[in-house]
Image (tube, rainbow, N blue to C red):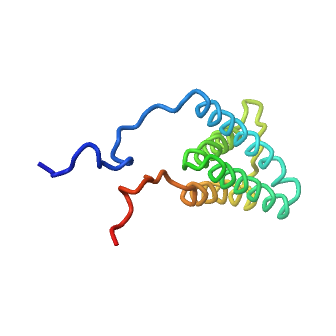
Amino acid sequence: MSGRTGATSSALAQPLRPPSFGRAALYLGLFVLGAVVGVAGALVQAAWFPGGLLLALAAEAGLCLGAGRAVGRRGGAVAPAAGWALAVVLLTTSRPEGDFLFAAGSGSYLFLLGGIAVAVMCATLAPVRQPDGDAVRLRK
């Protein structure tokens, strides 16, 4: 017996529910927007080094952090980061003809590793779900 009652349990202790249709559509849109930013960043970072690299990483940081703050949940920052990562990983593969997008250079590695670091930082800084109401406040 834990001594807890069902009426005073925390909102964080409740089972997870699937997101609503609107929230799922929002996350899908953020995923696609993250993929677009990843493709654009892959093209810009090599064209105008080092300014393009900084611009590409700033665009990813702005998208992930802004989406996390706008949605108010960590999933808002994770969705564009996952889209960015998927797009960039798919762009690293070479084609059968021998064509490739990322050259073996410091700029490409900084873009890949820096983008992953930016995504992790933005997902960490995004707001998390917090319980509300008088029952969760500290007693005085």
Quarter of the picture holding the C terminus:
bottom left
Q: Quadrant of residue 38?
A: top right
The residue lying furthest to the right in this view is: 48
Q: How many marks?
A: 0
Q: Name the residue at 70% across, 35% down.
A: 32
Q: Name the residue at 69% across, 53% down.
A: 66
Q: As drawn, is 37 to the left or to the right of 131?
A: right
The residue lying furthest to the bottom in this view is: 140
Residue 15 percent location from the top left of the image: 35, 38
Q: Nearer the viewer, residue 132 or 118?
A: 132
Residue 58 percent location from the top left of the image: 75, 59
Q: As drawn, is 16 to the left or to the right of 34?
A: left
Q: Name the residue at 68% across, 57% down.
A: 109
Residue 127 percent location from the top left of the image: 55, 56
Q: Name the residue at 20% across, 50% down.
A: 4
Q: Quadrant of residue 79?
A: top right
Residue 123 percent location from the top left of the image: 57, 54
Q: Nearer the viewer, residue 29 or 18?
A: 18
Q: Nearer the viewer, residue 95 or 54?
A: 54
User: Looking at the image, is 55 positioned above or below residue 86?
Assistant: below
The residue lying furthest to the left in this view is: 1
Q: Nearer the viewer, residue 101 or 62?
A: 62
